[in-house]
Image (cartoon, rainbow, N blue to C red):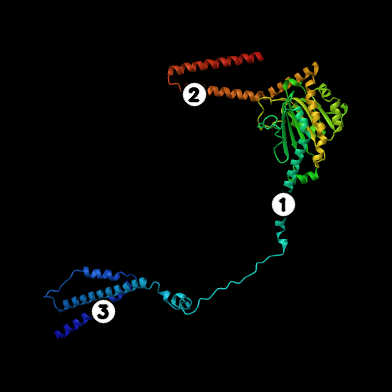
Amino acid sequence: MHTVMADARLKTLLVLLVLSLYVRASKYQAETEDNDFADFEEFDDDFERPYQGASPADGGGAAEPERAADAGRAAAADRVQQHDGDDDDDALVETEDEFEHFQDEEEFEGFESASPSRGSSKEQPKITIANVPVHRSTNWDKFYVEMLMIAGIVVYFINFVSGKTRNQKLANAWLSAHKNLLESNFSMVGDDGKAEPGSGAGLLKESENMYTLWCSGRVCCEGMLVQLKFLKRQDLVSVISTMMKAASDQVEIRVTMNAEEMDTFVFCLANKKSAARLAKEMTDISTYCPERKSAERFGLPAHFSVLSEIHEAAAAVLDARVVAVVNKYPELVEYIHVSDQYSGPKQQLDDQAPVELPKVKPTLAFCFNLPGRGRLQPADVETVRPLMQLVLYMVDRMKRCKLGREGRLKAEKNRLRVQEIFLKQTHQSRAEKAQAKREEKRRLEKERILEEEDPEKQRRLEEKNEKREAKRRAQMRQMKVKAL
């Protein structure tokens, strides 16, 4: 009876052990699905667990659990070995089969037959390029902008060359017509500052439409500058504007007189348009000749105006010969300007008043129009030779022209009055400059005192500076008392 009961208990224990092992294996499989290293952890745990041997005193029930534990460790070792084999397979796939898809025939269909490297018997197909003719459009309307631009450039270039050549021919024609006259009155004609006397350097080209000629070596004057100002025939825009509004080529002559060879007065004869412009632009005319008078009283055409500082000077300049030449060429004479206070056009200074009077020189200035009203021909230049003779005549005339006592006194009063007005206008600016200069001097003196290392010497300098300031203040008070 007892033996039967012992066998029943043993069977029950075996069943419970098998069930526990099954539950444990199921749980282990579920955990290893998420953790690849779970087998190694269990393997480590199994090997680190201390061995508990059964004593001979233990019964058969203690031996069975030990065998079950050995069986569990053997199963774990098998699983670890199987896991290592799986890892080796994965590594083999990554290293050896990474480019295996290149060997797949379904990936590249017809590759072996098309590739010559695989020993295909088929020939490589030849590529034939068709000869397509170049399309040349006959619709020129698409390029009208380009054609207009090209045509404009061509016309501008042709006009530039022709205008430049024509101005050069006109300048040479003028010099040929007046060269003998100039050489008979000046020892140097065409002096450019580098040529030797008598070499005849000729005209200097300032631009495509402006030429200059400097003459020197004559009594009564320092020199004569001739400027030939032709129309801008090389500029197409200027040519078109000249067609709309007529203009003339001009010759400007400026003779610088010796100071002792010319009396003190300002005079100008000009047509009405030029007279209004000169009265605004020229410093001497706007200062000494504010009034414009008609030239009819001197026997000149009505379109001329006279601007004269002294009536006596106008009568002295406009003698019979000058009036005859002006009446003969009324359309060619632009202006005749005689002045001992000539300083050129007014200088525009931005927010600054001039601190000194401009430098002046006695000068004769002439401006003559060339005939043709823009259609000047080289043969027409010879007709203006009397105008150059008039210039040379007036140079000699100014040497002999002397004002009376009353006229000279009036001219001197006018110049003193201009100087006083100028001093009043510039007093404020000069006072500001003087004050700034004094402040700078005081600042330097204070810096010198502060830089002195010796205290005694520094004290003496301070006392000296204070005495100087006290003396200056006393002088200022005295001046204020005298002014009252």
* Rendered location of residue 468, percent (x, y): 54, 16
Q: In which quarter of the image is the C terminus?
A: top right
Extreme left residue here? 57
Q: Residues within 10 Å of mark 3 (few under 14, many from 20)?
A: few
Of pointers 3 and 1, the one earlier in the residue sequence: 3
Mark 1: which amino acid? Val
User: Is 130 or 317 nearer to us in this picture?
Assistant: 130
Q: Please, what secondary structure does the residue beneath circle 3 have?
A: helix
Q: Does residue 62 appear to the left or right of 352 in the view shown?
A: left
Of pointers 3 and 2, the one earlier in the residue sequence: 3
User: Is 255 or 75 nearer to us in this picture?
Assistant: 255
Of pointers 1 and 2, the one earlier in the residue sequence: 1
Q: Nearer the viewer, mark 3 or mark 1?
A: 1
What residue would you read off at disc 3?
19
Mark 2: which amino acid? Glu
User: In the rendered image, is residue 233 in sight?
Assistant: no
Q: Which of marks 1 and 2 is in front?
A: 1
What residue would you read off at disc 1?
154
Estimate the spatial distance between the alpha carbons at disc 3 and disc 2, rounded to whole Å: 110 Å
Mark 3: which amino acid? Leu
Q: How crowded is mark 1: few (under 14 residues within 10 Å), some or many (20 or more)?
A: few
For the point 74% across and 47% down, which residue is it? 159
Estimate the spatial distance between the alpha carbons at disc 1 and disc 2, rounded to whole Å: 71 Å
